[in-house]
Image (tube, helix red, strand yellow):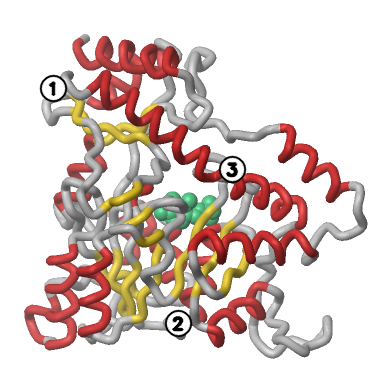
Amino acid sequence: MNDPRVPMSSPDLTAAERQAVKQVMESPVLSMGEHTTAFEAAVCEYVGSKYAIAVNSGTAGLHLCVRAAGIGAGDFVLTTPFSFVASTNVLLYENAVPIYVDVDAATGNIDPARLQEAAHDLAHGGAAAARWLPRRGVGAAQPAKAVLPVDVFGQPADYDAIQATAQAHQLTFIEDSCEALGAEYKGTPAGRFGHSAVFAFYPNKQMTTGEGGMIVTDDRQAAQLMRALRNQGRAEGDTWLEHSYLGYNYRTTELSAALGRIQLGRLNEMVARRDQVAGWYSEQLDDFELVHTPQVVASTSRMSWFVYVVRLAPQIDRQAVIARLAEAGIPVRPYFAPIHLQKYMRERFGYELGDFPITEDLGARSLALPFSSVMKQDQVSLVCEELQRAVLA
Ligand SMILES: *Cc1c(COP(=O)(O)O)cnc(C)c1O
């Protein structure tokens, strides 16, 4: 492609962030210091959680939640195929089995009615349970042990309904809020619904630490275990060469934590800017019937826009649109690519096109447009004009 005329995404960094990182570089403590502790405390306060554990990626955070929940080989976990691969991969790391539930067409979030049906069918066994299983790669049907929903594109999943199903079937509930820090469901922040929840700080997220993630939970025992697992399995009281558990190096750095503290302080301002940018897009595209703009549903009392994803009308050739936009210097991405159709998932579980039609339809028609909190209105206009031109060509 030509040099992009608008970047796909941009971090939003100021002199305050540069100063904070520079100060860490001038100190002798580069890991496990005061910034990590203070960053964790700040996230607790922002979300309203009792405990927060900083890690070096969102994926690492989700993996620790899976470990802390005792999810292991052969366990069934209800989750969504319309996500970034990490939400499924953390289950496979422990040889657990993702049981996919198709999504709601309006939001792309896990469909709560289907979820309820799946949990019920798996609990009762027989033919009704078997239809939720992949073609191969799993043993007999069994009740699900956990549920792992995702807040897709910064919009909270339908938590009242998910919590009801989790309670009815005693499911451990892990919230992948990696795309939704700052979002609220009926007035309650994303991250407050599961036994544990995870946020992520890759540079394209609402706030960044370069790489990084944060687990939040109210469960003291789980928090202690995850803290130990993050640090090579060292429990509280273990010396540097004592390891109570099989752990990982999922620690973050002081550089990242110092950066994260400043970014978190600016998060509300950045989320408001993203909301404004999304508003510009929707204003310009709402009347163009070949492109459907994203829907914010009534239960979302605060949207925290992670990406701005439109859907092309079914008759539009998306590949051609992407190519024309690339030619015009506008980067766009098909987003998400359904997880069940990834090569390694097809090979392991025998998934085929047609297995999750709503996910596949969204996956085939969606297009993420350039988006960030630093985007200007004339850049949005440029993208909208080129998009309309590319669609009509
Ligand atoms: C970003 C993201 C993650 C975590 O990604 P990392 O790159 O490991 O920080 C997990 N799940 C979803 C849905 C995400 O968008």
What's under tag 1, amino acid-wise? Glu
Q: Where is residue 156 in the image (x, y as percent from the top left)?
A: 32, 55
Mark pair 1, 2: CA separation: 46 Å
- Residue 69 is marked as 2
Q: Position of residue 73 (x, y in %)?
A: 41, 83
Instruction: Name the residue rendered at 65%, 66% in the picture.
Output: 250
* Quarter of the image where the C terminus is located: top left
Indicate left or right for 264 with 295 as reference.
Answer: right
What's under tag 3, amino acid-wise? Arg
Instruction: Name the residue rendered at 80%, 65% in the picture.
Output: 33
Indicate left or right for 14 with 32 as reference.
Answer: left
| Between discs 1 and 3, the one toward the N terminus | 3
Q: Where is residue 153 in the image (x, y as percent from the top left)?
A: 36, 46
- On the question of residue 140 being in view, the answer is no
Indicate left or right for 135 with 124 as reference.
Answer: right
Q: Mark 1 points at which residue?
A: 289
Q: Position of residue 37 (x, y in %)?
A: 71, 66
- Residue 266 is marked as 3
All told, the count of numbered labels is 3
